[in-house]
Image (tube, rainbow, N blue to C red):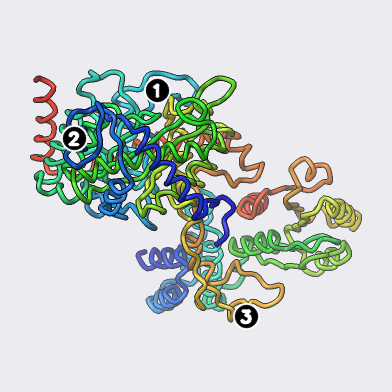
């Protein structure tokens, strides 16, 4: 198969790998967590203070233990997902502090916004998983908001979701709540029910919150994405080759720790590194460098036989406009086509992660649907080609009234919910609506028909009580 | 009434076999051909038209319903009383001289047929003389002119002028359509109506004849 963007060859894989091994062995990497340091020491790893020096053998041994693919169970088991090899998921935007509304006005996100995203994800035709911290609710106490978000994840949506990696205690709270939602800790120990995002602190560090969360989550059988977000030219080298090497060292170090905590811990090789904008010093996630790095990430993960994670519908635009559409489509389609297994930020992000937009969410969601359709294998069977039918219609005939056209008219092609296919007259009569306005109309209709998924009332009560109890401690 | 209701439903779902059986059964029960036509089939096609407009039904489904209707009408036609017409009127349609595009024109023809019009399709590359000959022969209520090219659009004007000169202009309505055509152009060349797609062409045709 020929693809102009899949450019890494065996020699490149080896060079990125060997140079990363050089970094881990000779420069080392910092883990700001005492238990992590103890675990590394116990496994015979050379440690100086908080700096860990890993050998290739230690990394390779960890890689051998990590699964190539795994399933994540949803509260509704029918919605469970598989991540790895040919299977992939679309997950929503993550970590935005603001909402940019349909008029282009930015405001602090609140819990109600978070809940609205849970409802949209629950009713989404194309998103496979719920996220976590789609927005950061500003109206809740920061020390306990992770539990409010977890509670909404379990009550408002029954798809598999992401987990809470805010701190060691934050991860424990998420685990306790997952145990309630899935009928006991023993039920989740060997069956991941969450995927949490563990980020390195580039260059070559992991913060205490992230390491603490990683240890707790891996110990309890929960999946973790070990990801690096390097700003090329700022927190990492200016060349993408250098970025690929540096992030590889960071990701592999995190994965090695996870496997030392628990053999076979499900992990995902992740990166959403991109370029620094040289004029402003800001991160640019609409840059071609982002898409390029998505592809490198997918290829490196395959080289190590690991599932991969990248960003998705990402943009620097501050409104769901043309720029947002172009940048998001390039990044999301690169992720899907490169074989990324966990496509985070598939829907909703605006302004280099600063905000989520409900209108943009719907727009990106449609893009997810279009990509799914594009990736669906074509059927070249006799029945599909049906040359006898083509002969029968013959020269100059038509297929409009052909029974096959009738039979397949709802299923053969993608049916858009937002994209306009009207002619000028129809578009004018309908008010010359731009796509964000169409999305806005759909949004209110969709939320009006939302129904909360079924949950055992005892389970709901236990979850709520857990959150209330912990808040009062 | 439930028999007629089932007939309406079978028509909407384009289920020919069931519809023909149901029509025959209704006749055997003594329901009149006229009632089956107006309260069963035409009611059904009205719903199909509405659903097409809202996007609930797709073009191939509408055409299938229309085809299904045509098959049922074949059974009913001999049984209808004298003077009771199935037809909403005669429509002559064609792509104008110099233009060989016919997908859109065909679609309009099929949609018109499904709405109960008798459609005479003159095909593509039709000169004004051919249009005139057909008008004299069939005395249509509507003439539809189609063009996809800006270079063949002037042939629409020429055809309309020819019809006007012949003295037949007041006896019929002229509709124009095609991707580059718009309302302003239709007004400029003296057409009665412009429709931007097959569904609205059909709706407009019915409205004009009311």
Q: Badge 2 is on which residue?
A: A174
Above or below for A35 versus A257:
above
- The answer to whether residue A205 of the structure is visible from this angle is yes
Task: Locate residue A457 relative to residue A445 in the image: left or right.
Answer: left
Task: Locate residue B123 relative to residue A386 in the image: left or right.
Answer: right
Between A218 and A246, which is closer to the camera in this rendering? A246
Q: State the mark number for residue A98.
A: 1
Above or below for A141 versus B143:
above
- The answer to whether residue B47 of the structure is visible from this angle is no
Please tell me which residue is depicted at 39% across the width and 37% down the height of the picture.
A23
Question: Please, what secondary structure does the residue beneath circle 2 have?
Answer: helix
Q: Position of residue A465 (x, y in %)?
A: 9, 30
Above or below for A5 versus A93:
below
Q: Position of residue A229 (x, y in %)?
A: 42, 33
Q: Residues within 10 Å of mark 1 (few under 14, many from 20)?
A: many
Distance between mark 2 and mark 1 Cα atoms: 24 Å
Q: Badge 3 is on which residue?
A: A392
């Amino acid at each position: 198969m020929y693809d102009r963007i899949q450019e890494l060859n065996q020699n490149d894989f080896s060079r990125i790998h060997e140079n990363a091994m050089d970094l881990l062995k000779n420069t080392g990497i910092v883990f700001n967590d005492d238990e992590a340091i103890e675990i590394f020491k116990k496994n015979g790893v050379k440690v100086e203070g908080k700096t860990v020096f890993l050998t290739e053998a230690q990394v390779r041994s960890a890689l051998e233990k990590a699964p190539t693919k795994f399933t994540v169970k949803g509260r509704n088991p029918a919605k469970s997902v598989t991540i790895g090899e040919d299977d992939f998921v679309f997950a929503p935007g993550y970590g935005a502090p603001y909402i940019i509304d349909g008029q282009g006005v930015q405001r602090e996100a609140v819990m109600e916004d978070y809940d609205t995203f849970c409802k949209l994800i629950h009713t989404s035709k194309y998103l496979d998983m719920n996220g976590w911290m789609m927005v950061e609710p500003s109206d809740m106490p920061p020390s306990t908001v992770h539990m409010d978000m977890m509670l909404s994840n379990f009550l408002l949506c029954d798809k598999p979701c992401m987990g809470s990696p805010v701190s060691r205690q934050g991860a424990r709270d998420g685990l306790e709540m997952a145990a309630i939602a899935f009928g006991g800790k023993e039920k989740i120990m060997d069956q991941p029910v969450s995927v949490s995002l563990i980020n390195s602190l580039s260059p070559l560090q992991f913060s205490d919150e992230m390491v603490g969360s990683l240890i707790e989550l891996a110990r309890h059988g929960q999946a973790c994405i070990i990801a690096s977000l390097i700003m090329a030219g700022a927190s990492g080298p200016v060349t993408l080759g250098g970025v690929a090497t540096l992030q590889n060292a960071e990701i592999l170090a995190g994965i090695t720790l996870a496997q030392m905590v628990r053999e076979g811990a499900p992990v995902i090789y992740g990166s959403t590194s991109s370029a620094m904008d040289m004029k402003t010093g800001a991160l640019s996630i609409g840059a071609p460098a982002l898409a390029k790095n998505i592809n490198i990430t997918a290829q490196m993960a395959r080289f190590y036989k690991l599932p991969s994670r990248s960003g998705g519908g990402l943009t620097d635009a501050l409104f769901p406009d043309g720029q947002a559409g172009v940048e998001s489509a390039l990044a999301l389609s690169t992720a899907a086509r490169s074989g990324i297994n966990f496509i985070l930020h598939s829907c909703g992000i605006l302004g280099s992660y600063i905000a989520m937009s409900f209108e943009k969410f719907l727009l990106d969601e449609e893009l997810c649907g279009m990509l799914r359709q594009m990736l669906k294998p074509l059927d070249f069977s006799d029945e599909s080609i049906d040359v006898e039918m083509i002969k029968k219609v013959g020269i100059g005939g038509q297929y409009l009234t052909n029974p096959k056209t009738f039979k397949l008219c709802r299923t053969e092609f993608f049916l858009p919910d937002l994209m306009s296919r009207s002619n000028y007259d129809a578009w004018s009569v309908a008010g010359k609506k731009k796509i964000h306005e169409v999305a806005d109309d759909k949004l209110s209709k969709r939320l009006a028909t939302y129904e909360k998924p079924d949950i055992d009332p005892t389970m709901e009560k236990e979850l709520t009580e857990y959150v209330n109890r912990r808040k009062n401690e | 009434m439930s028999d007629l209701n089932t007939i309406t439903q079978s028509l909407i779902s384009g289920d020919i076999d069931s519809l023909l059986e149901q029509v025959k059964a209704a006749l055997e029960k003594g329901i009149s051909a006229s009632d089956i036509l107006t309260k069963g089939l035409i009611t059904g096609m009205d719903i199909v038209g509405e659903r097409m407009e809202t996007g609930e039904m797709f073009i191939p489904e509408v055409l299938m319903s229309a085809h299904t209707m045509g098959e049922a009408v074949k059974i009913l036609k001999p049984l209808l009383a004298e003077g009771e017409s199935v037809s909403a009127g005669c429509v002559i349609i064609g792509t104008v001289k110099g233009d060989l595009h016919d997908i859109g024109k065909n679609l309009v023809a099929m949609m018109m047929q499904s709405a109960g019009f008798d459609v005479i399709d003159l095909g593509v590359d039709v000169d004004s003389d051919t249009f005139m000959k057909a008008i004299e022969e069939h005395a249509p209520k509507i003439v539809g002119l189609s063009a996809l090219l800006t270079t063949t659009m002037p042939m629409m004007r020429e055809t309309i002028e020819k019809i006007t000169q012949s003295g037949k202009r007041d006896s019929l309505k002229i509709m124009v359509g095609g991707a580059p055509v718009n309302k302003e152009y239709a007004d400029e060349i003296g057409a009665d109506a412009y429709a931007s797609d097959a569904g609205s062409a059909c709706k407009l045709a019915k409205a004009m004849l009311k």
